[in-house]
Image: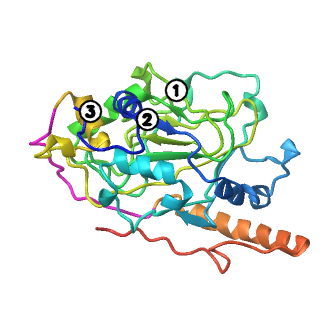
């Protein structure tokens, strides 16, 4: 089931890899100027000393955004690949998440994990992304899961773990639950979550170089890992949203996107003519928003203090306070 389309960014090998494993890496995809600009003040924003691990009082931090650049300018090659995976740029909603920014996800590790090993199944936070909408098999809000590497990530240094054979678990769960779900609770070991990682046998640690972009199927189970080496790890996770839900029953099979084809392949079918959602689609403010607003205030104050001390300037969209967050319901 391959889409008969013209591809200018994804090679045939990358397309086959995505259909088989649900992910693909786009090397050297982000412009160097953006990598440098978005990380140059990260330690000021964190309030930590990069040379003193004792000051790293938090292991993992999801930082808010202060600066942004349109996605097609930030990572042109990756944007081209994103469009090809989703069936064309015309299917992507240009009004939501159209930019990439410095909302860095930081993993600094801790002394607890330096000399310890952990089985990927026991990481405990296996999930799929999307905390702002009701998930259905055909949801288009989370068109892909995108991981942008802002520094080199070596093995055992906090790279995201994925479970490619877990995609079928998510697909089958959502197929059997047309009522959808607003969130996916899970046991600490992930045994009975929608991801069902305890049944998975394939686990991949995502490593790479600064500027690499890794594109995951939206139903790819993934988890933060332990940064055993305590090499500071910086990534971002910008969403991409479709104008319409996925179409799993297209009249012309050549019009299926690779994301849609992966779902159908996981179910062992060519189309789903009779499958329909049974509740309404909803979007809502993420539960983490309040915490992000508090972090914005703290970071801006640190940036202002640093600017006064050094004679520099503060570059932030939140200079006058957190910008209200709104999810547009369509």
Name the front one of labels 3 and 1: 1
Which residue is rendered at x = 10% and y = 42% of the image? Answer: 273
Above or below: residue 262 compared with residue 94: above
Within the magenta stretch, is there residue 283? yes
The residue that disc 3 covers is: 172
Q: Is residue 253 left or right of residue 71?
A: left
Q: Quarter-wise, where is residue 27 in the image?
A: top right
Name the front one of labels 2 and 3: 2
* Element on which disc 3 rests: helix
Q: Is residue 20 left or right of residue 212?
A: left
Image quarter where the C terminus lies is bottom left
Above or below: residue 97 compared with residue 30: below
Within the magenta stretch, is there residue 310? no
- Viewer-proximal residue, 163 or 99? 99
Q: Which mark is residue 15?
A: none
Above or below: residue 178 compared with residue 173: below
Q: Measure how far apart labels 2 and 1 are at the Cα level.
A: 10 Å
Going from the N terminus, do you reach mark 2 or mark 3 first?
2
Residue located farthest toward the bottom when viewing the structure as drawn: 320
Q: Position of residue 259 (x, y in %)?
A: 32, 41
Q: Position of residue 83 (x, y in %)?
A: 37, 51
The residue that disc 2 covers is: 23
Which residue is rendered at x = 37% and y = 57% of the image? Answer: 241
- Viewer-proximal residue, 55 or 156? 156
Please state the extent of the stretch shown in magenta in the rendering: 270-285
Q: Position of residue 244 (x, y in %)?
A: 26, 58
- Viewer-proximal residue, 258 or 111? 258
Residue located farthest toward the right when viewing the structure as drawn: 309
Above or below: residue 70 compared with residue 119: below
The residue that disc 1 covers is: 204
Q: Measure how far apart labels 2 and 3 are at the Cα level.
A: 19 Å
Q: Measure how far apart labels 3 and 1 are at the Cα level.
A: 21 Å
């Amino acid at each position: 089931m391959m889409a008969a389309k013209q591809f200018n960014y994804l090679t045939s090998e990358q397309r086959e890899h995505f259909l088989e494993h649900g992910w693909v890496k786009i090397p050297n995809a982000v412009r160097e100027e953006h990598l440098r600009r978005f990380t140059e003040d990260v330690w000021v924003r964190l309030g930590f000393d990069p040379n003193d691990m004792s000051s790293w009082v938090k292991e993992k931090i999801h930082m808010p955004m202060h600066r942004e650049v349109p996605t097609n300018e930030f990572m042109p090659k990756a944007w081209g690949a994103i469009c090809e995976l989703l069936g064309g740029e015309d299917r992507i909603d240009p009004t939501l998440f159209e930019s990439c920014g410095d909302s860095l996800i930081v993993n600094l590790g801790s002394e607890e994990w330096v000399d310890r090993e952990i089985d990927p199944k026991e990481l405990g936070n296996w999930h799929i992304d999307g905390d702002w909408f009701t998930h259905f098999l055909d949801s288009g809000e989370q068109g892909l899961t995108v991981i942008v590497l802002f520094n080199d990530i070596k093995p055992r240094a906090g790279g995201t773990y994925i479970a490619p054979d877990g995609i079928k678990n998510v697909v089958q769960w959502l197929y059997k639950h047309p009522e959808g779900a607003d969130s996916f609770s899970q046991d600490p070991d992930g045994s009975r979550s929608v991801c069902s990682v305890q049944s998975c046998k394939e686990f991949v640690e995502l490593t790479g170089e600064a500027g690499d972009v890794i594109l995951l199927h939206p139903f790819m189970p993934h988890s933060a890992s332990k940064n055993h080496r305590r090499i500071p790890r910086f990534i971002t996770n910008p969403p991409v949203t479709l104008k319409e839900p996925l179409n799993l029953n297209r009249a012309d099979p050549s019009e299926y996107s690779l994301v849609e084809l992966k779902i159908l392949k996981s179910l062992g079918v060519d189309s789903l003519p009779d499958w329909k959602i049974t509740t309404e689609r909803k979007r809502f403010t993420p539960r983490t928003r309040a915490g992000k607003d508090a972090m914005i205030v703290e970071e801006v104050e640190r940036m202002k203090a640093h600017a006064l001390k050094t004679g520099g300037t503060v570059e932030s969209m939140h200079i006058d306070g957190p910008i209200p967050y709104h999810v547009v319901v369509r």
